[in-house]
Amino acid sequence: MQDVNEKLSSHRISKLKIVLLLTSAYFVVEIIGSLLTGSLALIADAGHMLTDVGGLALALLALSFTRRKPTPQRTYGFYRMEILASLANSVALILLSIYIFYEGYRHLFQPPEIQSIPMTIIGAVGLAVNLFSVRTLGGHSHDHDGHEHEHEHEHDEEENLNIKGARLEVLSDTIGAIGVIVTGIIIFTTKFYLADAIFSIALAVFILPRTWSLLRKSINILMEGVPVGIDYEDVKNAILEVKGVTGLFDLHIWSITSGMNALSAHVVIIDQSKAQVILKEVTGILENRFKITRSTIQIENYHE
């Protein structure tokens, strides 16, 4: 069964590598194309592509690099690499968006002449790359063993979510490619060069909220804040409502990486003979109700 899972994982990693390579290559083409054609829209779409390059790289990290085994120096393994990459990607995109806003504003008053034919061709190539990438990531792999272990099933589900997330990233990029094509056609047929600046600003507006959300999430994880979607007081009250629990202190909730939540706490009980039963109930509540899969509970018979 392990061999099957390894083959599936390798197959998914290969897909992501192919799409990441194509997307990165087209990103470079757009940057060069923007310099040759004078089109700000190509730079803006390159920024949109960069969000997808970042998303694909994070998915690849989640499926490969972050699976490295923990070491005595890094007891949680390499999961935080995903968050560090996410933070770097977010900062780069915010700086790029600011540049696009600045240049777009300047071009509104002094729109430069745009080489619309090369611009449209580059957009068409981008559309083809995106459609091919969506198709590459669209295949589904299924396990043939019906007796897989629960943790293997969770790993498989997590991998599928990463692939789906990457596919949605690439699918959203088709909007940018179509926008570049339409803008190029408008400029070619009407000589309305202002369309380039308008589309660029619109695309930057589309990128910025997604990037800001990603930045906040990355900082929250690195600061070991309570994960989004989990209420500290709800968790605290749920543990205190367990029969036999009389107190709770040193409760900490954080994320190791996206989708992997952890908790530590000291739980006070009176009847030590029921410690294992209470511990099992508490961990069950944490996993089923709050999706906290990694918990360290210290049973105490006194309050601080």
Image: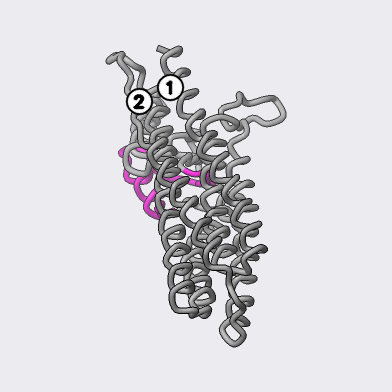
Q: Is residue 136 left or right of residue 147?
A: right
**Residue 284: within the magenta?**
no
- Residue at 57% x, 58% y is 46
In this figure, which residue is indicated by the disc labeled 2? 141
In this figure, which residue is indicated by the disc labeled 1? 8
- The reply to whether residue 269 is in sight is no
Sequence-first tag of 1 and 2: 1
Q: Residues within 10 Å of mark 2 (few under 14, many from 20)?
A: few
Residue 92 location in percent, x, y?
65, 58
Above or below for 18 versus 56: above
Q: Nearer the viewer, residue 209 or 13?
A: 13
Quadrant of the rendered structure where residue 58 is?
top right
- Residue at 37% x, 44% y is 290
- Residue at 46% x, 18% y is 7
Above or below for 212 versus 227: below
Q: Amino acid at mark 1?
A: Leu
**Residue 251: within the magenta?**
yes
> Where are the magenta residues, as a range?
229-258
Q: Residue furthest left?
A: 146
Q: Which secondary structure lies at badge 2?
A: loop
Q: Are marks 1 and 2 in contact (CB under 8 Å)?
A: yes
What's the CA distance linking mark 1 and mark 2? 7 Å
